[in-house]
Image (spheres, rainbow, N blue to C red):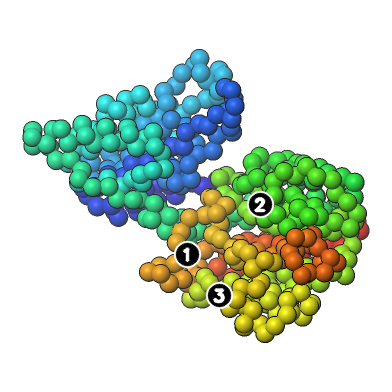
Amino acid sequence: MIKMTTFANRRNYLLKKIGPLGALILPAAPELLRNGDAHHAYRQHSDFYYLTGFEEPEAVMVLLPKRKEGEYVLFNRVRDRSREIWDGPRAGQDGARKTYKADQAFPIDELNARLPELLHGRDVIHYTLGIHPAFDNVLIQALNSARSRIRGGVNAPTAFVDLSSSIHEMRLLKSAEEIAIMQKAIDITGLGHVAAMTACKPGMHEYELEAAFLYECQKRGARFCAYTPIVGAGKNTCVLHYVANNAPIHDGDLILIDAGCELNNYASDITRTFPANGQFSKEQRAIYELVLKAQLAAIKVIKPGVSYQKPQEIIVKVITQGLIDLGILKGQRDKLIKDKAYFPFYMHRSGHWLGIDVHDVGHYSIDEKWRTFEPGMVLTVEPGIYISADIKGVHQRWHNIGVRIEDDVLVTKKGCDVLSHAIPKSVADIEKLMRG
């Protein structure tokens, strides 16, 4: 768990950054209906959680630098015994102050009345428009109310500043506390992948492997996935975001599982590919080892000062040359790369940032130049090759071979650590595991 002092330190950093006349406003995520009157499981907005640790809906955080009555104001639900019987306990205003360290806490129903007053004397509102359309209207009404008192000598904000870049650059660099949580999530995810591999037998359905993965994660306290698991067999390995997970598994199929649990709101993201019958065919093994070669080469170059684009460039070179060596592509490597001849087989990028969101926040380029790695960044490295049966000119022995190998990597002061290194991924280790 993240300590409450950590959330306070993050808020204090932003209080200094937005200046003495600024105001930062951030609403909690709304509850979402699934169907009828049934809701999806609630998940707090990532930025809101990052700054507050507060996981209830119907809440708004307001940061007001240099405010005498308190710089951190939280609006949240009141304690209500009748609702708590149905939905569980609430923090209430006392809990907001004592547990979550708000300087002041008010009932959420008082937001419309109190917000205009809180904006008095402020010149800029740090808030991201367009993310919460309903709250956009609440905030604009409060701003108009504050501005209506200008003739009485009260100053009101005259500008909005998108707050996402400030918070998101903070989130990009992980602390030791965050890395420890992510490591635990990754370790649990690894046990889920191993369980799916060892359970796999031809004749099962994809959802049975999904269930084996989920069981291992949930029994260790990771109740939710960071994203919908991808469990594809055979031709479904060539569908990048396949989530139906309901097809039968045949002897000779490859299985691609892209799944990661979420723990204390932090994500993991791992992909492993393995043979349904426990033994790679000659063609499956050739493609698998090519993808693994590309991944290992990409990971090797990750260190501070190296361009984010460098792993992608290496992956493209290794995959293109490998496809030439296998006779799947024909021509000179550099010309094929220039023409993107690899694209029908490898059509995505090398990876993405990882953190509270599975596709975590933070810029990939600065001033139209790829940014360089810094210690504390966590990213995925996930090359793949997908040879669907509808790619023309490819011999059928390669058809429906889809391979992706994905690991979670921490940039360190001297290089990088593969946080998911313990999860089997060599051909020998996977086949040994599946033999039991």
What residue appears at the point 60 percent right and 76 percent down from the top-left corner?
A: 339
Sequence-first tag of 2 and 1: 2
- What's the amino acid at mark 1? Tyr
Disc 2 designates what residue? Answer: 241
- Is residue 218 something one can see in this rendering? yes
**C-alpha gap between disc 2 and disc 1:** 22 Å
Q: Is residue 355 left or right of residue 256?
A: left
User: Are discs 2 and 1 less than 8 Å apart at CB?
Assistant: no
Name the image quarter holding residue 286.
bottom right
Q: Residues within 10 Å of mark 2 (few under 14, many from 20)?
A: some
Quarter holding the N terminus is top right
Q: Residues within 10 Å of mark 1 (few under 14, many from 20)?
A: some
**Rendered location of residue 112, percent (x, y):** 29, 28
Disc 1 designates what residue? Answer: 364
The answer to whether 415 is drawn above or below residue 422 in the figure is below
Q: Is residue 269 left or right of residue 215?
A: left
Q: In the structure shown, which secondary structural element does the residue marked by tag 2 occupy?
A: loop
**Rendered location of residue 435, percent (x, y):** 91, 58
Mark closer to the observer (2, 1):
2
Disc 3 designates what residue? Answer: 310
User: Are discs 1 and 3 less than 8 Å apart at CB?
Assistant: no
Q: In the structure shown, which secondary structural element does the residue marked by tag 1 occupy?
A: loop
Q: In the structure shown, which secondary structural element does the residue marked by tag 3 occupy?
A: helix
The answer to whether 23 is drawn above or below residue 343 in the figure is above
Sequence-first tag of 3 and 2: 2
Name the image quarter holding residue 429.
bottom right
Q: Is residue 200 left or right of residue 386?
A: right
- What's the amino acid at mark 3? Lys
Quarter holding the C terminus is bottom right
The answer to whether 169 is drawn above or below residue 145 in the figure is below
What residue appears at the point 55 percent right and 17 percent down from the top-left corner?
A: 85
